[in-house]
Image (spheres, coloured by chain):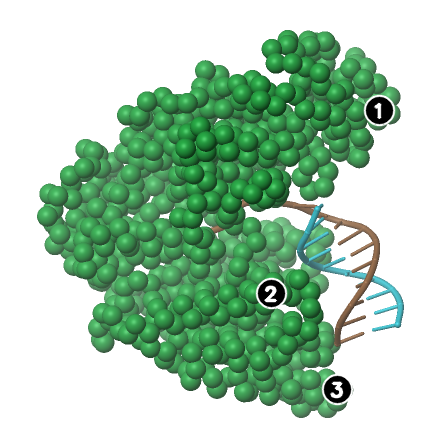
Chain colours: A green, B brown, C cyan
Amino acid sequence: MGADLLCGLNPPQREAVACTNGPLLILAGAGSGKTRVLTHRVAYLIAHAEVPPFGILAMTFTNKAAAEMKSRVATLAGSEARWVWVSTFHSLCARILREDIEALGYKRSFTILDESDQTTVVKRCMKELNVSGDMFKPPSVLAAIGSAKNELTDVDDFRENARDVRRRTIAQVYEAYQRTLVTGNALDFDDLIMVAVRLFRERPEVLEKYRNRFTHIMVDEYQDTNHAQYMLVKMLAARTRNLCVVGDDDQSIYEWRGADIRNILEFERDYPEARVVKLEQNYRSTQTILDAANHVIANNRDRKSKSLWTARESGAKIALYNADTEKDEARFIADELDRLIVAEKRCYGDFAVLYRMNAQSRAIEEVLVSRGIPYRIVGGLKFYERREIKDMLAYLRVIENPEDSVSLERIINVPRRGIGDSTLAAARSLAQEKGLPLLAGVQMAAESMELAARARNALADFLATMGRLQPLRGERTVSQIVRAVLDETGYLTDLEREQTIEAEGRIENLKEFITVTQEFESRHSEGPLDAPSDTPLDVPGGRLQVGASGPNDLAAFLEEVSLLTDLDRADLSADQVTLMTMHSAKGLEFPVVFIAGMEENVFPLARSAYDPAALEEERRLCYVGITRAKDRLYLVHAFTRAIFGSSTANPVSRFVEEIPGHLLVDAFAERYAARHGWRDETRVTVPGQVKMEAPARVKTVGTEPSKQGASEFAAGDKVRHAKFGEGTVVSVNQRAGEWFASIAFPGGGIKQFLLSLAPIEKVH
DNA sequence: CGGTGCGTTATTTTT
DNA sequence: TAACGCACCG
């Protein structure tokens, strides 16, 4: 059996699978069969090394990766596999904390806050502390708090290390924020990890329990771990040191979110006895695509050198298309897509369109809709972030955890019941005086003579409603509770009364939400599958509790939902074109990939261009994007792009320049022009609302581009414009035989000019 | 209290 | 473009 598991693997893969003891670092390039190695290794541990399955812990970042690994391990190792713990970092920590968090003074019914909840709390804390929203943007304050938590820096540490005014102010907000969470018995995503580490530190006997349990630990995407996750893994693995981490420093694209690339670069320092295996054979892409990826990434300094190779032939060249605008870009993509469906008998599911920012999806979507091409968007507007869904979840959370003040604030006046800001503020201050959760403050306020009778009645009504809903917890199934909330609160009636398309959409979403709860119930009523009665932790499959609708159903549902993302709901098997950011595309592959927006200031983003570390991360993102493609890759850039309202002209991305010319082919010259002829995109909108007429194009394929004006100006030149005054040439680029210059004016932004017409002269 | 309208601002986001 | 915060008014 053990030997079977080594069949069909290449030598380094085999080495990684068969290395069952001690620390192991697997450097797995893109498409090198990483998941295959991980799953085979789990099966091998069970079958060959006789490791009990419940001693194996495999950690991933996404539920999707966890689910895939789980099912593939099941295929290889059979029913034994369900005892293996395959879990995301966050759900592992959530489960550990549900068991033992009481040791730290939280209750086991704690709520998990998502990002929008966090923003709400931070904004409120800033307001209470009179911190100016101009100087301190809530998202950046939140980011500072988040990265502190990722570094395991608590409020006290943070305050002590706050040197300047800014940091000291943030320290105050952090303190207030954390106090809000603690009194609300709530944890944010970062807390899940940080508090778990704290639990291990303060309760060695708890750590000991897990250390003894997990004799073999595996971590996927190790390059994306942050310090807290690193520490968690280190603590868990300290006894046996049977730690296998898999990652690729070239695919580290979450540094901005706290991922610490040193975790992988310095693994051998942490574990000097570590074995290192490099997987460099790529089974995914053509040689041309790999060459391009290798050339781009070679421009990064800080990396473990490796070079991907493939046994596949070189394949098609990478098609580069210079679109006029983002609309033309979308049109080109749709054209090529249709063409390949016929010419190469492709299906929609073979294609992915990748971009840097979600905002770019719009133009592409519009064209796909108008052509009737089926597509799916990953990311962007999320199901669980829709208002009505968040409202329902907030009700459920308050029912489950009445101390959850964040959720309570969300729903106390939804639907409208006449509880306004001032009433709420009164309740809040009453609660704060006594250090009690908000609900207690609401109860006091309802009886307080300080408040108007109308406000008191409104509060009393609300309390009565919640009083009817609260007892349903443990008595009814989740879907029954949701229905009760919709009815009792009048939420549904209000929406129905609205009679708008928007309201109808919300009702549809609520129906969908009920379906989600029902699915959850049917999954959980299949009865105890395999849970031994001695410890509820022994449930494989990421579930908190097993069994028919019991008292903890709601808790389990809420936990599952808080840790779920849209990606987990997306059905990637349907025959549709996939649109998503390059970040979301990590770990996926497609026969044909389009990368849109290959322009400076878009990709790489303008703010990353001058920060070497940020630029390297952008480049890794580019590497990830390129290596998603199996057979064909398209790089598309637009001469001008309307984004956030105004249009800007950007030069082609430096990443395109980093690809050797012989790997590229001009898609326009190759076929697009031949099929369509030139179009007459004549109007170019430039920043500052200046509209400029460019001559209609009368060019035919093969005509030499005009060289006129080419030598006149160059980047860096100082020029004077008749209207805008002195400026500096940022770039000069050619388009359809005409030369354009981007000129920066002090204080006036960057404007685009047609050199043959614009009133500009050189200044010496 | 709650609705309207204006001005500001703008990555990426595994959980 | 579009979402959100804030100020103002009924």
From this view, report whether residue A163 is shown above or below residue A456: above
Q: Which mark is residue A454?
A: 3
Amino acid residing under circle 2:
Arg
State the image coordinates of residue A437 (x, y, percent, origin top left): 56, 78
Rounded to the nearest angstrom, the CA distance separating label 2 from label 1 is: 52 Å
Checking the image for residue A725, the label placed there is: 1
Mark 2 vs mark 3: tell me if same chain. yes
Q: Residue at x 50, y 33 (%)?
A: A337
The one of A549 and B14 positioned closer to us in this rendering: A549
The secondary structure type at the circle numbered 3 is helix
Give the secondary structure at mark 1: strand
Tell me the amino acid under the disc marked 3: Arg
Rendering coords of residue A680 (x, y %):
71, 24
Question: Residue shown at 37%/78% (left/top)?
Answer: A549
Give a yes or no on whether discs 1 and 3 share a subunit. yes
Residues at marks 1 and 3, CA–CA distance in whole angstroms: 63 Å
Looking at the rendered image, the quarter that the C terminus of chain A falls into is top right
Question: Which is closer to the viewer, label 2 or label 3?
Answer: 2
Nearer-the-camera pick, C1 or A105? C1
Residue that label 2 marks: A506
Residue closest to the eye, A386 or A394: A386
Circle 3 residues within 10 Å: few <14, some 14–19, many ≥20: few
How many residues crowd mark 2 within 10 Å: few (<14), some (14–19), many (20+)?
Answer: some
Query: Tag 2, which secondary structure?
Result: helix
Marked residue nearer the N-terminal end (2 or 3) = 3
Horizontal side of residue A146 vs A500, given as left or right: left
Q: Chain of mark 3?
A: A
